[in-house]
Image (spheres, rainbow, N blue to C red):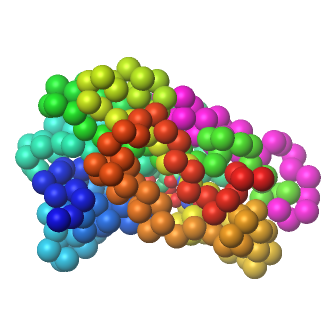
């Protein structure tokens, strides 16, 4: 038997990187998956990949900064796929070009809206699982790209991103405490640098790539499928007593 048989999952940021890999992995484990992304075509593409391999999926356009739309996406998942057992609050943006307000809106408020709508709904339905994507930046400060190139940055790097991802750890713990008795487990995943479109700019030259790899004691970056594996585990009954946890998947980045 597969680990997510008869479960329904909603994944945000499902059109790319970690969200796409996790949607595919959830489906392989038997879940029906609602693929949500602000990039509707990308979400549809992930859903089509699931359908092509015989899984059950649907797609919708969702901007996680829209509080009401997040609530509506949960209702749409129940309508279209017949239930809701898992929410993977994964959509996020890097700190590079977006300003403070936008990074906090997507990475922190977006996760909050998911928790706020899904936790009571899952509790009412008899329980469920919420997984949030934080980061190593939810636990430690980051060394910026300028420092990677041996230069001193004009401004401290990654402030908004680091603040948003630390906030996700806090929200994870608060909702885990508040909803544990009601059958809802809430955890987060804290990836190291992963080879997705988000990090493409940092990896485009050999020097940047080698520097980032060197920060990970395993001497390499992560693959989206390695984060998806952690998400499947947390979503499954194998993690039935895991609640409020920050699951670091970083090749040892934060071990030193
Ligand atoms: N790649 C890494 O190294 C890394 C490391 C740690 C944490 N993370 C986190 O993992 C998550 C996924 O990142 P990724 O690396 O797969 O990036 P990605 O850029 O490949 O995918 C992110 C997806 O989120 C979608 N998205 C962006 N804004 C959105 C919004 N407002 N509403 C809905 N969808 C939106 C994008 O369209 C995209 O499909 C993010 O939360 C990111 O912060 C990534």
In depth, the one of 233 and 90 nearer the eye is 233
Residue 90 relative to residue 142: left or right: left
Q: Position of residue 174 (x, y in %)?
A: 46, 24
Quadrant assignment for the N terminus: bottom left
Residue at 8% over, 46% down: 82
Please tell me how many numbered marks the rendered image carries.
0
Q: Where residue 48 sits: x, y (%)?
A: 21, 70
Q: Residue at x 72, y 53 (%)?
A: 255
In magenta stretch: residue 156: yes
Q: Is residue 157 above or below residue 120?
A: below
* Whole-percent x, y for residue 221 in the image: 63, 69
State the image quarter where residue 43 is shown: bottom left
> Is residue 29 part of the magenta span, yes or no?
no
Q: Is residue 208 above or below residue 167?
A: below
Q: Is residue 252 above or below residue 177?
A: below
- Report the residue at 54% width, 29% height from top: 170
In this view of the protein, can residue 86 be seen by the observer?
A: yes
Q: Is residue 42 visible?
A: no
- Where does residue 13 sit, x and y in percent of width and height? 39, 53
The quadrant in which residue 145 appears is: bottom right
Left or right: residue 52 versus residue 184 is: left
Does residue 239 sit above or below 177 in this rendering? below
Q: Which residues are magenta?
A: 148-171
| Residue at 14% across, 74% down | 54
């Amino acid at each position: 038997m597969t680990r997510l048989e008869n479960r329904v999952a909603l994944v945000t940021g499902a059109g790319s990187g970690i969200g796409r890999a996790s949607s595919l992995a959830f489906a392989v484990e038997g879940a029906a998956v609602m693929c949500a992304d602000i990039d509707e075509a990308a979400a549809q593409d992930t859903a089509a990949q699931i359908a092509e391999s015989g899984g059950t999926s649907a797609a919708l356009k969702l901007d996680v900064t829209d509080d009401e739309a997040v609530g509506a996406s949960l209702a749409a998942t129940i309508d279209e796929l017949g239930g809701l057992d898992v929410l993977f609050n994964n959509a996020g943006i890097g700190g590079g070009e977006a300003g403070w307000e936008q990074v906090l809106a997507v990475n922190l408020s977006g996760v909050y809206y998911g928790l706020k709508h899904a936790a009571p709904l899952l509790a009412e339905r008899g329980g469920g699982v919420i997984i949030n994507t934080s980061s190593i930046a939810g636990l430690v400060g980051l060394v910026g790209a300028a420092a990677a190139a041996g230069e001193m940055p004009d401004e401290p790097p990654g402030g908004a991103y680091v603040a948003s991802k630390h906030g996700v750890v806090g929200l994870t713990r608060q909702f885990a405490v508040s909803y544990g008795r009601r059958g809802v487990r809430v955890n987060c995943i804290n990836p190291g640098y992963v080879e997705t479109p988000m990090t493409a700019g940092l990896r485009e030259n050999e020097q940047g790539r080698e520097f980032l790899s060197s920060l990970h004691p395993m001497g390499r970056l992560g693959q989206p499928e390695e984060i998806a594996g952690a998400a499947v585990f947390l979503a499954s009954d194998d993690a039935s007593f895991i609640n409020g946890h920050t699951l670091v998947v970083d090749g040892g980045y934060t071990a030193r």
